[in-house]
Image (cartoon, coloured by chain):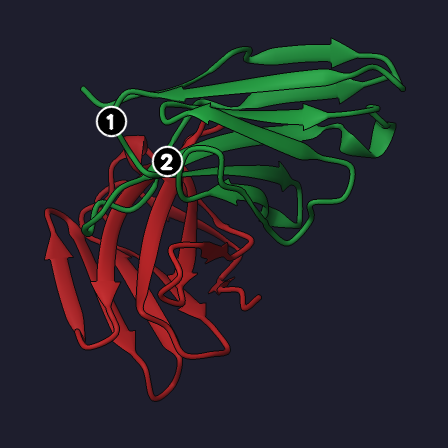
Chain colours: A red, B green
Amino acid sequence: SQQGEEDPQALSIQEGENATMNCSYKTSINNLQWYRQNSGRGLVHLILIRSNEREKHSGRLRVTLDTSKKSSSLLITASRAADTASYFCATDDGNNRLAFGKGNQVVVIP
Amino acid sequence: DVKVTQSSRYLVKRTGEKVFLECVQDMDHENMFWYRQDPGLGLRLIYFSYDVKMKEKGDIPEGYSVSREKKERFSLILESASTNQTSMYLCASSGHGDGGQFFGPGTRLTVL
């Protein structure tokens, strides 16, 4: 199965700065999703973008999708210490099963 | 508040033991999933289920089986636990629409 790959793998920023993560994938998708995982916990769904959408916003989150380049980006604006977590992209090929990337560790320094 | 619960947060078992990991969701979701998460490997799908008594193999089903007798409950079974099954196990459920998958808190299993 295909798999998203996040880049960069680890990111350390100051509180108030923006954090940007990228995700690439290999085959066609129905939608792409981003999840957050706090240390040692389950994942929390953040946002879903469909293959016919180019950009989506949710609060301080902005997701873009470029299907021609098979890539997506997640932007967190005005980061907070509570945003410290691992972020995963996951692709859905239309069969309800997700293929996850390896994750991207973000540390927000107060 | 929607919820996916898993029977244990931490579990320690011995090699060769039969292990049951239980997952319950209260959202009336059709789809349920079991993943394992290992450092450097991300989340890998073990099994999933689209309906009661239905199951489908994921990417790494070897050494595992599942049971879904009721819609809200999805069990992962390790018939004979081995040390390479030491991992974090995550259960998830999903319904229709754009809500994504809802995850439980995870069970950290150690096999000695």
Q: Position of residue A98 (x, y in %)?
A: 44, 55
Q: Is B110 on the left or on the right of A10, as rendered? A: right
At mark 2, the secondary structure is strand
Which of A14/A96 is in front?
A: A96
Q: Which residue is mark 2?
A: B93
At mark 1, the secondary structure is loop
Labels 2 and 1: the sequence-earlier one? 1
Residue A50 appears in the figure: yes
The N terminus of chain B lies in quadrant: top left
Which of A70/A78 is in front?
A: A70
The type of residue carrying mark 1 is: Met
B55 lies above or below B90: below
Q: Position of residue B88 (x, y in %)?
A: 62, 29
The C terminus of chain B lies in quadrant: top right
Residue at x 49% of width, y 64% of height: A4
The type of residue carrying mark 2 is: Ser
Q: Position of residue A72 (x, y in %)?
A: 34, 70
Residue at x 22% of width, y 47% of height: B96
For mark 1, name the chain.
B
Q: Is A92 on the left or on the right of B78, as rendered? A: left
